[in-house]
Image: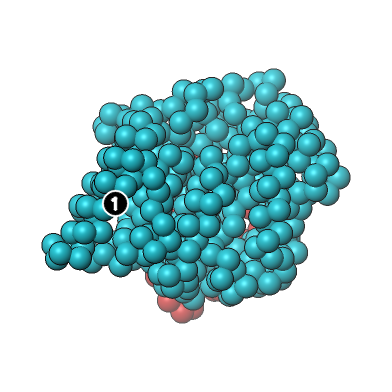
Amino acid sequence: MTTATSFVLARAREQVLERGEGLSEEQVLEVLQLPDSELDALLELAHEVRMRWCGPEVEVEGIISLKTGGCPEDCHFCSQSGLFESPVRSAWLDVPMLVEAAKQTAKTGATEFCIVAAVRGPDARLMAQVAAGVAAIKDAVDINVACSLGMLTPEQVTALAEMGVHRYNHNLETARSHFPNVVTTHTWEERWETLRLVREAGMEVCCGGIVGMGETLEQRAEFAAQLASLTPDEVPLNFLNPRPGTPFGDLEPMSGPDALRTVAAFRLALPRTVLRFAGGRELTLGDLGARKGLLGGINAVIVGNYLTTLGRPAESDIDLLGELEMPIKALNETL
Amino acid sequence: MSAVGTFCDRCGAPAGEGDHARCVRERALEPPRFCPECARRMVVQVDPFGWTARCSRHGERTS
């Protein structure tokens, strides 16, 4: 350990672990630049921070796509854009299947079930389907319902809050400075506005993004700092899984050490936030990644499959939590 | 999976032509997208614990 890297970790220990103050953008960049030889020490510190400020519980969530494909937006990572030559076709899920998925999710011990639609923002038909789905789930399953339906109007935010949607996901996806390289059909600021409305309505804010989309380390640090300034209740951290037919389809998945360094750096920027392992972890980190991430700052997971790709079997993650003696967060507790 | 059938269910190309090693590898973390019998794009629904894929000509497959 050099004097410089030793200083980075020692300062983070004092600032984040002892005082609970997240790292600044410049400090996050220094963490992202730590050499592989410091990775174990970094992950250990991030784990200590998570245990100190969040506790040992892990929040488990299942997600499902209510409306798949045919999206008018051009998010360059997404196989559901109707603007790319992706093999993903449009599909709608009916309410009985939605309820069944929520039931199966709850059986794993999960407390969160997120309904997702590939849209710019919901139209009246989608809002009606969501209303019917949320009501049916609440009648049948004891689980928190979250939604991710794109950009919202103030009226739609109010409607979702009144349905009992407790958390809304809307990812900023990447650093503000990198966003125009990722999406051109809407702006980072439009996304921020929806997040502002969600918070005003009293719903929990879930906002994260995808790393490994060609951003520099400086932009990755910028993104962490921008998320920290939002103070979201949850940050889902995805790793790019290059999808065939998308503009990012030929990018190389980020390396395992880079992914883990990013996990730890985001934890040190956001010491009290629910930091969720999301899509791409199986590709980037393999089976060992779940363990290393959970011992490196992660305190929430998406179990089972994702929206258009498959994940590890849910029981693999649940068994791992048992092995690590990390209890699943109970319903109605707040991490 | 993948290249088993007349067509590769990941890329839709004839299973007997070209190299589908990557398709086979990627299919571990992807549902099928093309009907292995006719190469039509299928309507696929992924849920937390499985998937269904429907070809307009050859019907539904499940995980």
- Answer above or below: position of A251 versus B50: below
Which residue is at the front of the view, B27 or A42? A42
Q: Is residue A293 visible?
A: no
Count of numbered badges drawn on the protein: 1
Chain B's colour is red
Q: Residue at x 48, y 57 (%)?
A: A225
Q: SS class of the residue under badge 1?
A: helix
User: Where residue A19 sits: x, y (%)?
Assistant: 33, 40
- Answer above or below: position of A89 versus A251: above
Decide if residue A46 is on the left or right side of residue A307: left
Which residue is at the front of the view, A100 or A217? A217
Query: Residue at the right extreme?
Result: A124
User: Where residue A77 sits: x, y (%)?
Assistant: 57, 66
**Residue density around tag 1, few if under 14, some if 14–19, many if 20 or more, within 10 Å:** many
Q: Residue at x 79, y 35 (%)?
A: A159
Q: Residue at x 32, y 47 (%)?
A: A15
Quadrant location, the N terminus of chain A? bottom left
Q: Is residue A105 visible?
A: yes
User: Where residue B13 sits: x, y (%)?
Assistant: 56, 73
Decide if residue A40 is on the left or right side of residue A115: left
The chain that appears cyan in the image is A
Q: Residue at x 43, y 47 (%)?
A: A270
User: Where residue B27 sits: x, y (%)?
Assistant: 46, 59
Q: Provide the chain ID for the residue under circle 1.
A: A
Residue bearing mark 1: A12
Hey, what amino acid is under mark 1? Ala
Which residue is at the front of the view, A74 or B15? A74
